[in-house]
Image (cartoon, rainbow, N blue to C red):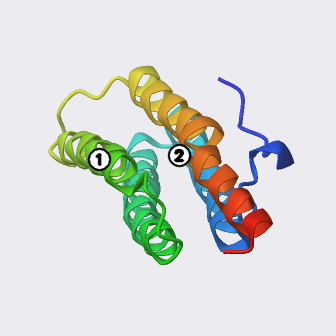
């Protein structure tokens, strides 16, 4: 897989969220490098675990921040969006626990899962909120 390069077209128009999305992409790229890298297997496993933990923690942090911004903007799409967050958080948590327990984790499957969800969520779901923010700004609310 190729590293994800941030595209400014993915910005939703909220500085904090856009910066967090860029950070999230950076973390995914670190995770991909850790899982596809080559080093001493014991060291590599610890690096993978550390990066996986960081992406899991950052996912939760980002979701909490984003949901607060959405609530403050009174976005009517919050319930559906929150459900997407909750489901993804659960999947990442389960995969992390499997990895931490030494269960077989298919690297390509894990990376594709996170990559596809992340890109779809930013490019489709979060842009819906960005459009709402633009409409609210244009109507003076």
Residue 83: mark: 1
- Left or right for 42, reference 32: left
Q: In the rendered image of this protein, does residue 103 appear above or below residue 100? A: above
Q: Quadrant of the N terminus?
A: top right
Q: Residue 21 appears in which quarter of the rendering?
A: bottom right
Q: Does residue 38 appear in this view?
A: no
- Near mark 1 (Cα within 10 A), the count class, few <14, some 14-19 or many ≥20, is few
Circle 1 — which element? helix
Q: In the rendered image of this protein, does residue 123 appear above or below residue 108? A: below
- Left or right for 3, reference 105: right
**Residue 112: % across, % down:** 49, 25
**Residue 71: % across, % down:** 43, 72
Residue reaching furthest to the right? 8
Disc number lying in front (2 or 1): 1
Q: Quadrant of the C terminus?
A: bottom right
Q: Residue 92 appears in which quarter of the rendering?
A: top left
Circle 2 — which element? helix
Q: Residue 110 appears in which quarter of the rendering?
A: top left
Q: Nearer the viewer, residue 24 or 44?
A: 24
Label 2 vs label 1: CA separation?
A: 25 Å
Q: Does residue 65 appear in this view?
A: yes
Residue 52: mark: none
- Left or right for 89, reference 69: left
Of the numbered discs 2 and 1, the one sitting upstream in the chain is 2
Q: Nearer the viewer, residue 31 or 64?
A: 64
Q: Residue at x 41, y 40 (%)?
A: 41
| Numbered circles on residues, count | 2
Residue 31: mark: 2
Q: Residue at x 40, y 21 (%)?
A: 109
- Near mark 2 (Cα within 10 A), the count class, few <14, some 14-19 or many ≥20, is many
**Residue 77: % across, % down:** 43, 51
């Amino acid at each position: 897989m190729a590293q994800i390069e941030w595209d400014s077209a993915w910005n939703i128009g909220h500085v904090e969220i856009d910066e967090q999305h860029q950070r999230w992409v950076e973390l995914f790229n670190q995770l991909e490098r850790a899982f596809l890298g080559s080093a001493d297997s014991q060291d590599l496993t610890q690096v993978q675990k550390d990066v996986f933990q960081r992406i899991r923690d950052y996912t939760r942090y980002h979701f909490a921040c984003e949901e607060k911004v959405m609530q403050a903007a009174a976005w009517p799409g919050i319930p559906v969006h929150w459900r997407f967050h909750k489901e993804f958080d659960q999947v990442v948590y389960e995969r992390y626990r499997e990895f931490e327990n030494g269960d077989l984790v298919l690297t390509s499957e894990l990376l594709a899962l996170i990559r596809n969800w992340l890109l779809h969520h930013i490019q489709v779901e979060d842009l819906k909120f960005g459009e709402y923010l633009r409409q609210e700004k244009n109507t003076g609310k």
